[in-house]
């Protein structure tokens, strides 16, 4: 199967390292597509960040894949840290880039080995703690 966007070994290594990290709180690994080279690039690693801070960090006119280690509080008092893929695809993004982003999503999701994907198209207003809790606790 041919891929539209290449996932270099450095990204695979970053994903593996992120998956097995040992810290508490929310953390996010932000990945973008280099459109000129059709390859994924790591933008940044954010540790101990609130969802609202994360929403402000992400560009309002460019899609990103955000691997999120999310500190989830359950009704019975337990805490867990599920890995979630946030598909950040603001409607204000360039159509060509959104199409490329969408075409590479499944391959990235499989490479990151994440089953839960949360679509965010509304920009920062769509990425809130309440929205993530609603998706993960249903």
Image (spheres, rainbow, N blue to C red):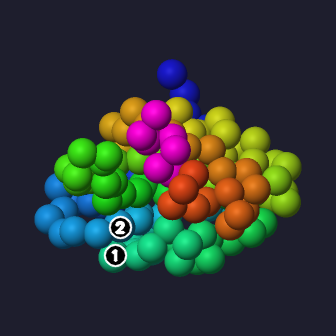
Name the side, left or right, on which 123 lies relative to 52: right
Q: Which mark is residue 27?
A: 2
Q: Which mark is residue 47?
A: 1
Look at the picture and state if 85 lies above or below 40: above
| SS assignment at label 2 | strand
Rendered residue at 41%/64% (across/down) = 29
Q: Please, which residue is most extreme toward the top here? A: 1
Q: Is residue 134 magenta?
A: yes
- CB-based contact (under 8 Å), mark 1 and mark 2: yes
> What stretch of residues is rendered in magenta?
132-138
Viewer-nearest residue: 56 or 21: 56
Name the side, left or right, on which 125 lies relative to 110: right
The number of discs equals 2
Name the side, left or right, on which 39 lies relative to 47: right
| SS assignment at label 1 | strand
Q: Is residue 58 magenta?
A: no
The residue carrying pointer 2 sits among few (fewer than 14), some (14 to 19) or many (20 or more) residues within 10 Å by Cα, namely many
Secondary structure, magenta segment, majority class: helix
């Amino acid at each position: 199967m041919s891929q539209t966007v290449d996932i270099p070994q450095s990204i695979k290594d970053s994903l593996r390292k992120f998956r097995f990290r040992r810290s508490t709180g929310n953390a996010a690994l932000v990945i973008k597509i280099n459109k000129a080279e059709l390859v994924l690039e790591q933008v940044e690693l954010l540790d101990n960040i609130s969802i609202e801070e994360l929403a402000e960090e992400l560009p309002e006119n460019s899609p990103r894949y955000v691997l999120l280690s999310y500190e989830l509080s359950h009704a019975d008092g337990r805490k867990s840290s599920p890995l979630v893929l946030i598909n950040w695809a603001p409607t204000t993004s360039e159509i060509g880039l959104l199409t490329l982003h969408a075409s590479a999503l499944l391959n990235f999701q499989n490479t990151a080995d994440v089953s839960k994907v949360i679509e965010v198209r509304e920009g920062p207003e769509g990425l809130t703690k309440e929205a993530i809790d609603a998706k993960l606790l249903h």
